[in-house]
Image (spheres, rainbow, N blue to C red):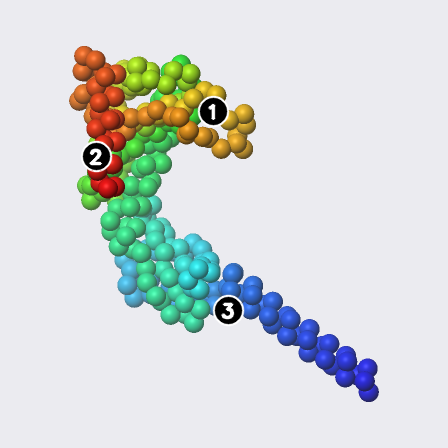
């Protein structure tokens, strides 16, 4: 009798532990039933609100931070029409981020930004005799994304928004003379390729800080840099001095804002 009771208690304890384990796992990855409900709710929501966009559900995943599911949808006719729909565990739609991602042209910006980075590597990487750690072409921070057009093609020779060149390199020479030298080399190269630039951002890292392998983090300790230097000032007679003053002015402006 006692043995039977012990087996019953052990079985009950095992069931309780399994339930607790399932609840624990569910809190992090959700469950298949709610996943199906989320997809179904998202499809109904699409049919009711975005039927003209030809949206297709790409994936559904659980967001444990908000205890909800996000259903990622993508248009079959527009590469820039892609956003998420948030659904709770009971199949109720909470919100979608169409306005932020698509209507505000953020998906378009993100696609073009990735394309700019690829172009920078192709057009600059290996073309100049500097030890570059990072090379990027990007839209300037003040750019108005509403000037972009959904699914537009990038014309690098006539970009829809002003462009900036942003590089980081290693060198034993941490001076504004070196920064000016790199900036002029970039200017000449990009002019040869008819790529218009509005701003230059250059950071020099001590060569001694260069990582020994890819797993080692890059240190910016003792780096020298200039950010958002206007292209229309690249012709100044004493460019290193102009850059030093510009960087000092930016630093003082930031300091005043922080006080």
The image shows residue 94, relative to residue 56, as above or below, that is below
Going from N to C along the chain, the mark reached first, 1 or 2, is: 1
Q: Find out whether the residues at labels 1 and 2 contact each other: C-beta distance under 8 Å.
A: no
199 relative to 95 in the view: left or right: left
Q: Quadrant of residue 12?
A: bottom right
Measuring 36% from the left and 52% from the top, which residue is drawn there?
74
- Quarter holding the N terminus is bottom right
Residue located beneath label 1 in the image: 209
Disc 3 crowd, CA 10 A, few/some/many (<14, 14-19, 20+): few
At horizontal 31% and vertical 37% (from top left) the residue drawn is 112
Q: Describe the element under mark 3 as helix, strand or loop.
A: helix
Q: Secondary structure at mark 2?
A: helix
The answer to whether residue 230 is seen in the rendering is: yes
Q: Which residue lies under the disc numbered 2?
A: 253
> Quick one: 158 or 173, which is closer to the camera?
173
Say which quadrant the C terminus sits in. Answer: top left
| Residue occupied by mark 3 | 33
């Amino acid at each position: 009798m006692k043995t039977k009771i012990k087996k019953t208690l052990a079985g009950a304890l095992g069931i309780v532990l399994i339930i607790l384990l399932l609840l624990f796992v569910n809190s992090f990855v959700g469950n298949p039933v709610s996943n199906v409900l989320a997809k179904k709710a998202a499809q109904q929501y699409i049919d009711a609100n975005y039927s003209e966009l030809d949206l297709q559900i790409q994936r559904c995943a659980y967001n444990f931070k908000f205890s909800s599911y996000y259903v990622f949808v993508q248009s079959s006719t527009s590469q820039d029409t892609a956003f998420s729909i948030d659904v709770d565990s009971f199949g109720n739609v909470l919100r979608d981020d169409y306005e932020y991602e698509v209507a505000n042209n953020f998906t378009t910006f993100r696609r073009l930004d990735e394309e700019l980075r690829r172009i920078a590597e192709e057009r600059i990487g290996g073309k100049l005799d500097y030890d570059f750690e990072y090379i990027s072409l990007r839209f300037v921070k003040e750019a108005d994304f509403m000037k972009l057009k959904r699914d537009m093609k990038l014309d690098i020779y006539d970009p829809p928004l002003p462009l900036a060149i942003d590089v980081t390199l290693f060198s034993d020479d941490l001076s504004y003379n070196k920064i000016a030298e790199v900036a002029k080399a970039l200017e000449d190269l990009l002019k040869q390729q008819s790529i218009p630039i509005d701003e230059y951002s250059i950071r020099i890292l001590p060569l001694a800080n260069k990582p020994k392998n890819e797993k080692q983090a890059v240190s910016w300790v003792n780096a020298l840099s200039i950010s958002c230097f206007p292209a229309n000032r690249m012709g100044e007679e004493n460019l290193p001095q102009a850059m030093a003053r510009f960087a000092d002015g930016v630093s003082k402006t930031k300091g005043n804002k922080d006080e």
